[in-house]
Amino acid sequence: MAAGRQQKYLVVVNPISRGGKAVQEGIWLVKHLGRLGVSHEAFFTENAGHARNVVKRWMERVDVVVAVGGDGTVNEVINGMMSVPGCDRTLAVFPAGTADDFCHNVGIPRKDRNRALEVMLSINDRRLDLIRYNDSYAAVQLGVGIDAEIAYRTLRHKKIKLLAYVYVGTRMALIERMTNSSRLMHIESDNGVYDGKFLLAVFGNAPLYGRFVYWMPDARMDDGILNMSALRPLSPIPAYYMFLRCFSKEYRNKKITYDASTRFLLEVKEEAYMQVDGEVYKYPAGETLDISVERSALRVRLPSVPPEGVPYSIT
């Protein structure tokens, strides 16, 4: 396979990411690739599912697929890549989202275009695990509960998504008291069974969640294991205090159920909100998810000198 600037890149831009600002990032990137003489094709997506279809159509004609957008764009690109069996290509990410959880976890610089471009044009590829749920894939995490409900309520506020998320979350905690946010679930893992009401249950392979929160502090992206952190119903003030403490990687709480397994089976016994890599869905009662790790599933372009504490091996 060709290396670095001699490779051919497929650039997939989601123009509505980061409140519409991602289109500027995509234009900047495409212009710089042209000036550098890097072979590429570029597409600006038009609707949900477009990125996946573009990737599926072009996979065998490129070396590297670049997702320009947020975690939802990364997710759609990954599912496009995984839909072409035996076509082993590299994923690169040029961050242009609101949270950019994937980039924060792997160390891709979010606020420095030139450094992000350097990573993209490097030859430092590593294999990372993916999360498989039923017949789809996630890069970082999927969660059921209050976080997804808050995200669902803020969908119409894409241009001020972060502020809207904080406002809705505060309103639910202090005014609505989160009385209706817990959901009845049945969870199975290699280690046990968990039944009852949960305020939040998250499954993933990376520690950072919501950009800054270490909700799964022990998770790693290349160990062949998935992690779960699940919270039983809790009153608003203790819940808020606990989430603030989760900004520290060392924090643990006995009210959070931690587990690590190669597979989880999740049955949602009540209608619930679910988010997968930041994209929100509403699931009916009785929905069952078979969640497993797909070990070393994807080649990813990462910083040659990653920041300290990245959740994957650098040797």
Image (cartoon, helix red, strand yellow):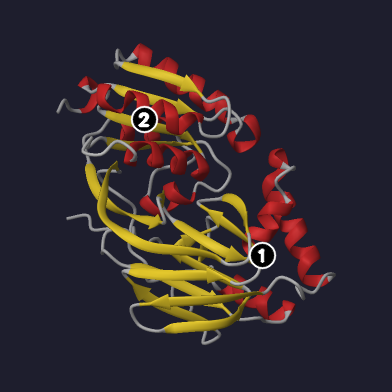
Residue at x-position 76% and y-position 70%: 173
Residue at x-position 78% and y-position 66%: 172
Between the residue at mark 2 and the residue at mark 1, the CA separation in whole angstroms equals: 33 Å
Q: Check disc 2 and give the amino acid type.
A: Lys
* The quarter of the displayed image where residue 119 is located: top left
| Quadrant occupied by the N terminus | top left
User: Where is mark 2, residue-wise?
Assistant: 56
Question: Few, some or many C-alpha atoms within 10 Å of disc 2 (few <14, some 14-19, many ≥20)?
Answer: some
Residue 288 position within the rendered picture, expressed as x and y whole percent measured from the top left: 50, 65
Q: Is residue 309 something that shows in the picture?
A: no
* The quarter of the displayed image where residue 160 is located: top right
Q: Check disc 1 and give the amino acid type.
A: Glu
Vertical side of 117 occupied by 295: above or below: below
| Quadrant occupied by the C terminus | bottom left
User: Where is mark 1, residue-wise?
Assistant: 271
Question: Few, some or many C-alpha atoms within 10 Å of disc 1 (few <14, some 14-19, many ≥20)?
Answer: some
Which residue is more in the foreground, 134 or 307?
Answer: 134
